[in-house]
């Protein structure tokens, strides 16, 4: 992630003109890379200092993003082993509440950066979900 010559590795970018704080941009991008499977269990992330230097940010900004990703159980940091993508804390095939919350937070942050209020965000989600399925009715015996 830190070597720009390696185009196969996902890159994290920060838009300093965005209303979304830099730590949140980093957290959201890394969470999306993990949830989408572009970063998988065991993949090593750059150190806080390295990513901060790459992005020209204070180390505390990157540290906050990493802390939030750890709280969401998406990464783990071990002294001597570095920061790595964690094992998924859920069974395949079932939605993970932590991942759903992360995705919702990412969408909400991006929508708020566009100036959307709560009602507009909820309307967009309802529209994206499509119509409610018709209830299943059983014939009378």
Image (spheres, rainbow, N blue to C red):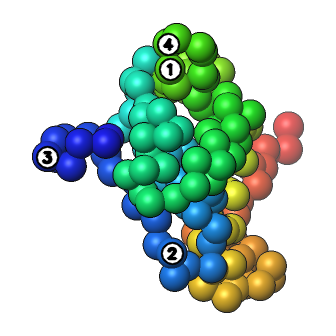
* Any part of residue 127 in sight: no
Q: CA distance from mark 1 to mark 2?
A: 27 Å
Seen at 47% across and 72% down, the residue is 15
Q: Is residue 21 above or below residue 67?
A: below
Q: Earlier in the sequence, mark 3 or mark 1?
A: 3
Q: Residues within 10 Å of mark 1 (few under 14, many from 20)?
A: few
Q: Looking at the rendering, in which quadrant would you find the C terminus?
A: top right
Residue 42's image quarter? top left
The answer to whether the residues at label 4 and label 1 have Cβ atoms under 8 Å apart is yes
Q: Nearer the viewer, residue 84 or 35?
A: 84
Q: Secondary structure at mark 2?
A: loop
Q: Is residue 110 left or right of residue 71?
A: left
Q: Secondary structure at mark 3?
A: loop
Q: How many marks?
A: 4
Q: CA distance from mark 3 to mark 4?
A: 24 Å
Pointer 2 residue: 16
The answer to whether the residues at label 3 and label 2 have Cβ atoms under 8 Å apart is no
Seen at 64% across and 68% down, the residue is 21
Q: Nearer the viewer, residue 44 or 102?
A: 44
- Residue 95: x %, y % from top left: 64, 34
Q: Earlier in the sequence, mark 1 or mark 2?
A: 2
Pointer 3 residue: 5
Q: Secondary structure at mark 4?
A: loop
Seen at 14% across and 46% down, the residue is 5
- Residue 53: x %, y % from top left: 42, 50
Q: Earlier in the sequence, mark 3 or mark 4?
A: 3
Marker disc for residue 82: 1
Marker disc for residue 81: 4
Q: Nearer the viewer, residue 135 or 77?
A: 77
Q: Earlier in the sequence, mark 4 or mark 2?
A: 2
């Amino acid at each position: 992630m830190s070597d720009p010559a390696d185009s196969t590795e996902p890159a994290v970018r920060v838009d300093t003109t965005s209303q979304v704080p830099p730590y949140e941009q980093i957290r959201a991008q890394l969470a999306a890379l993990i949830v989408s499977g572009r970063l998988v269990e065991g993949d090593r992330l750059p150190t806080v200092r390295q990513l901060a230097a790459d992005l020209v940010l204070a180390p505390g900004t990157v540290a906050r993003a990493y802390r939030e990703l750890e709280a969401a159980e998406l990464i783990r940091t071990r002294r001597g082993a570095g920061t790595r993508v964690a094992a998924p804390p859920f069974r395949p095939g079932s939605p993970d509440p932590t991942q759903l919350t992360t995705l919702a937070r990412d969408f909400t942050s991006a929508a708020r950066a566009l100036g959307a209020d709560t009602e507009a965000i909820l309307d967009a989600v309802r529209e994206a979900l499509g119509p409610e399925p018709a209830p299943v009715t059983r014939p009378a015996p």
